[in-house]
Image (tube, rainbow, N blue to C red):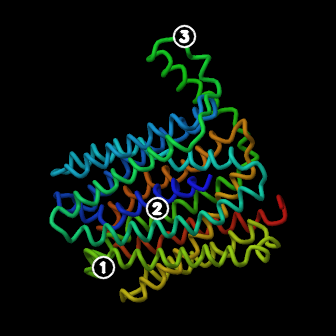
Amino acid sequence: MNLLYALFVLDILNIAIALPVFSAFVRSVGGSPFTLGLINSSGALVSLLWNPIVGSLSDQVGRKGLLLKCLIASSVGSVILAASTSVWLVFVGKLVGSLGSPVGILLRSIVADTYRTSEEKKAFFGKNGFFISVGFLVGSVSSGFLSEAKNGFAMSFLMMAAVTGISAAIAFQTVSDDTKTQDKFADVSFSSKAVSKLRSAVVNMKTISWSRYQSLFCIKGFYDLSIAIIFTSVGLTLINEFQVKGRTIGYVFVISSLCRIASGLLKIRLKSALANTSDYSRITGVGVILLVSYVAMGVSGSLSVFVLFMGIMSFCRASMDTTLTEMIATRTTSEDRGKVIGAFENLNSISMFIAPILTGALAELLGLRFIIGSAAIPISAASLIAYKAIGKTE
């Protein structure tokens, strides 16, 4: 089961490769900040509609087959991006690649299926945060250097396609077959089977006990919105405000990755001490630090100060991501795990749909730094909800 760590690392590696170069790539084919926002929002809309369906469907037909299909879609999308010479091709590549967005949901569901006790799940996700940070670091450095080479953008996207191809090979060999209720669709045509499965998945999502997860979903939603605001603005801020480009952008994300690694290592070292602190207490504290970081990034006039607080943000984000993942994985049951985790992770898609349109339009009116500072509003709401939840559920 150690290869599950490899699948998570390859998933984040795929994301990290794109992050430093995508904004510059869109600009290189004639895109504006608004165009970039529109492309990102369109991809997020596909994820928004697709993720919960795949999560719910995986409870019925199994995780492995869907995981392989999503990895293939992601790889095809990367190949299209590598061949893109116009904004329209970038748009198509982004949409196709977004069909692979449920990979993280399926991997988290597989972990929750594999490890039975809450302690085992928390141990896995605690260690996994460190490995993910290493993957993010490698991806950021690689794409930063590749972007300066001839055909560097194409090479970066082909590297993404190779990464997802390797992931598919590992998943095919290591993830156990879990046919679940596939047999009830065995005697119908392919098209009827697909429609029946999708309809069943949508109906199945309605059975979620939303009141049980209300606070957690609200926290995750506001937190994801704050992160979406930052990461749809940070690339353009580095390029336009601080004139950073190429491998230097990669170095900035390397610093962020190192901070995430440090956060993961610290959490492992302080495991016993953190066991006496409630999840909601940790979320509240980390949320306050994120709030300060967002404001500081928004008002900073120098690159060094901006990068410093970006590093602090990354340190806190690693802790927040791990804590939220542990909480949702340990609170779900085997009957509703896929659909709940799918809906939970889909909050990120909602945020990534909203944020690019807002930031792309408002950045030209109010400035990129104002947009970054505005991320303090949703993280304040998340921290307040977590603070009120302390003592109520734990």
Q: Residues under labels 3 and 2: Cα distance? A: 44 Å
Q: Nearer the viewer, mark 3 or mark 2?
A: 3
**Residue 274, horizontal then vertical, whole percent:** 76, 74
Q: Nearer the viewer, mark 2 or mark 1?
A: 1
**Which quarter of the rendering shows the C terminus?**
bottom right
Q: Which residue is mark 3?
A: 187
Q: Residue at x 61, y 58 (%)?
A: 220
Neighbourhood count class around disc 1 (C-alpha, 10 Å): few under 14, some 14–19, many 20 upward: some
Neighbourhood count class around disc 2 (C-alpha, 10 Å): few under 14, some 14–19, many 20 upward: many
Q: Which residue is mark 2?
A: 228
**Residue 369, horizontal then vertical, whole percent:** 38, 76
- The amino acid sitting under disc 3 is Asp
Element under label 1? helix
Q: Nearer the viewer, residue 248 or 53?
A: 248
Q: Residues under labels 3 and 1: Cα distance? A: 57 Å
Label whose residue precedes the other's in the sequence (3 or 2): 3
144 lies left or right of 319: left
Q: Residue at x 68, y 73 (%)?
A: 268
On residue 248, which mark appears?
Answer: 1
Q: Which residue is farthest top?
A: 187
- The amino acid sitting under disc 2 is Ala
Q: Residue at x 68, y 48 (%)?
A: 112
285 lies left or right of 247: right
Q: Residue at x 38, y 54 (%)?
A: 163
**Residue 244, horizontal then vertical, whole percent:** 27, 79
Query: Is the residue under label 1 in contact with that under label 3 (CB below 8 Å)?
Result: no
- The amino acid sitting under disc 1 is Thr
286 lies left or right of 237: right
Q: Quadrant of residue 178?
A: top right
Query: Is the residue under label 2 in contact with that under label 3 (CB below 8 Å)?
Result: no
On residue 197, which mark appears?
Answer: none
